[in-house]
Amino acid sequence: MDLSRKVVLMTGVARIGHEVALSLALLGASLALVYFKSKQAAEKTAHLIRTNKGVVQLIQADLSLPGAGAVVMTQVKKSFKKLHVLINMASCYEHVPVNHLISHDWDQNLTINLRSAYELSLEAAKLMRKSEWGRIINIGDWTSASGRPRYKGLVPYYVAKAGLQGLTEVLALEFAPHILVNMIAPGPIVPPVNASKKEIHAVLRETPLKRWGGREEITKAIRFLIDSNFVTGECVRVDGGRHLY
């Protein structure tokens, strides 16, 4: 796949985002990477891309602020004049017992996990329509994609990610035929930083493929959805079969 004439905008550059950005840059894509607090991770990614003669722009933005999507897109238009792929990977994830939830928890989850993807998608579509080609890829979660909440303490997160799947489907209809909109629902890709051995083994026990997938599996799924010309409104679960349990 040759992306040498394509511009990719991606939010969320730490951990999995780092691998995705490097992979797309090696395929020739020019990248605009949005970060909020992960400046060091973003600069590391950008340095590696430039070392390999790739093109990358870093954009610092607080996606929880109203109108942030329009501000980000203004910078993309100024630097690249066009956009072909949007990857909404920015996310927040916190355990909060349901009886301790406050309005801030709801606002933060719905804003970062859902509204920011909505706003950026609307802005991105304006540029994509000019070239009559576009791909929007949202990063969801295997739990909401399975249709069954599996863990307590994640009420606003689960609701926001379920909403993201709904957003994916309606935008796929609204933006057709030239812009394809899909979602990837990761499962056990990499162990959480603070996960205990007991928690890690519990995940493996409940995953049919009995292993963690690795960041490359998300990268493969993203490349597939960029390359495909006939998949839209779909949710691709990359979870080693975890949803089957």
Image (cartoon, rainbow, N blue to C red):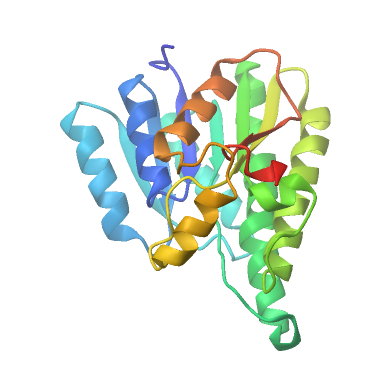
Quarter-of-image position of residue 106: bottom right
**Percent x, y for residue 177?**
77, 17
Q: Please state which of residues 99 and 111 is positioned toward the viewer in this rendering.
A: 99
Quarter occupied by residue 2: top left
Residue 162 is situated, as x and y percent measured from the top left of the image, at 76, 52
Rendered location of residue 88, percent (x, y): 57, 44
Give the answer, above or below, for where 5 lies relative to 113.
above
Residue 242 occupies quadrant: top right
Kindly give the residue lying farthest to the front in the view shown. Answer: 205
Q: How many marks?
A: 0
Q: Residue furthest toward the left?
A: 51
Q: Nearer the viewer, residue 234 or 34?
A: 234
- Which residue is at a point 43% across and 61% down the rendered structure image? 36
**Residue at horizontal 31 percent and vertical 23 percent from the top:** 26
Q: Is residue 83 visible?
A: no
The N terminus sits in image quarter: top left
Left/right of residue 162 with respect to residue 195 in the rendered view? right
Question: Which residue corresponds to the image point at 70% horizontal and 19% vertical from the top-left?
Answer: 231
Residue 130, x across and y down, in percent: 63, 21
Residue 147 visible in image:
yes
Residue appearing at x 45%, y 58% in the figure: 200
Vertically, is 5 above or below 70? above
In this view of the protein, which residue sits in the foreground, 94 or 63? 94
Q: Decide if residue 138 is on the left or right side of residue 160.
A: left
